[in-house]
Amino acid sequence: MVRAKSDALVGAGILDGDVLIVDRSIGLGTA
């Protein structure tokens, strides 16, 4: 879910805070 996507993005070097915000905006439409 969003958790998995967040972990993947964090692993890529993106800040967890930014990931959460992006996932809430974009993730809702794709997840």
Image: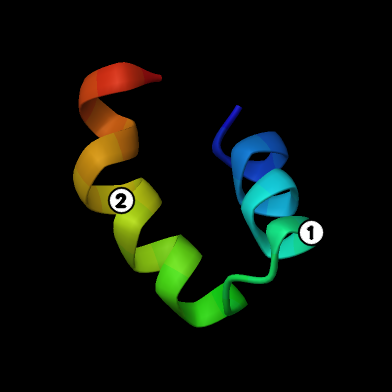
Residue at far front of view: 12
Residue neighbourhood size for the residue with mark 1, other residues' Cα within 10 Å, grouped as few (<14), some (14–19), many (≥20): few
Residue beneath disc 2: 24
Left or right placement of residue 10 versus residue 31 in this view: right
* Residue 21 occupies quadrant: bottom left
The residue tagged with tag 2: helix, strand or loop?
helix
Left or right placement of residue 17 versus residue 6 in this view: left
Sequence order check, earlier mark of 2 and 1:
1
Question: What residue is drawn where x is 71% and y is 36%?
Answer: 4
* Quadrant placement of the C terminus: top left
Question: What residue is drawn where x is 66% and y is 43%?
Answer: 3
Q: How many marks?
A: 2
Image location (x, y in percent) of residue 25:
20, 49
Residue beneath disc 1: 11
Callout in the foreground (2, 1): 1
Question: What residue is drawn where x is 49% and y is 80%?
Answer: 17
Of 24 and 8, which appears nearest the observer? 8
